[in-house]
Image (tube, rainbow, N blue to C red):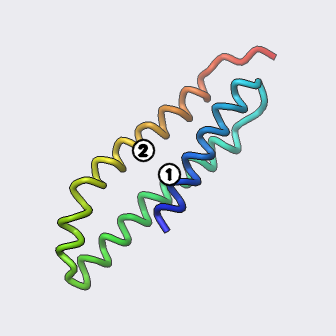
């Protein structure tokens, strides 16, 4: 589920940038992108929680170190992309 949320967040961030470049209102893309970024983090945390509860420590040891760094990077990138579009000067 977190993969679907993450892909949706990326697509919405790209649409946010495209619509901002075309001088159109992109606030909904920004909202949806940041919302799906949050849902991605919550879904991944929920999955890791499930692995911990059932005792699947090999999955935690395999996935968490790498994906933790990836999620940090993608979250920061999402916030920056949406923030750049938010503060970009648009002349109509």
Q: Quadrant of the C terminus?
A: top right
Using the rendered view, name the quadrant where residue 8 is placed: bottom right
- Relative to 57, residue 44 above or below: above
| Relative side of 8 to 68, left or right | right
Quadrant in the picture for residue 60: bottom left
- Name the residue located 32 percent from the left edge and 78 percent from the top edge: 50
Q: How many marks?
A: 2
User: Residue 78: which numbered mark, if any?
Assistant: none
Q: Residue at x 44, y 66 (%)?
A: 43
Residue position for label 1? 37
Q: Is residue 87 above or below residue 65?
A: above
Residue for badge 2? 75
Q: Label 1 to label 2, Cα distance in Å?
A: 7 Å
Q: Assess whether mark 2 and mark 1 are in contact (beta carbons under 8 angstroms).
A: yes
* Position of 61 relative to 78 (above/below): below
Secondary structure type for disc 2: helix
Rendered location of residue 72, percent (x, y): 34, 45
Classify mark 1: helix, strand or loop. helix
Q: Residue furthest right?
A: 92
Residue at 49% across, 68% down: 1
Dot 1 alpha-carbon crowd within 10 angstroms: few under 14, some 14 to 19, many 20 or more = many
Earlier-in-chain disc, 1 versus 2: 1
Front residue of 79/56: it is 56
Q: Is residue 67 left or right of residue 18?
A: left
11 shown above or below 26: below
């Amino acid at each position: 589920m977190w993969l679907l949320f993450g892909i949706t967040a990326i697509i919405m961030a790209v649409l946010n940038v495209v619509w901002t470049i075309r001088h159109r209102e992109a606030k909904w893309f920004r909202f949806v992108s940041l919302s799906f970024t949050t849902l991605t983090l919550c879904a991944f945390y929920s999955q890791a929680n499930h692995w911990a509860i059932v005792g699947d420590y090999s999955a935690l040891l395999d996935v968490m170190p790498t994906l933790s760094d990836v999620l940090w990077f993608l979250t920061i990138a999402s916030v920056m992309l949406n923030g750049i579009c938010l503060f970009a000067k648009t002349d109509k």
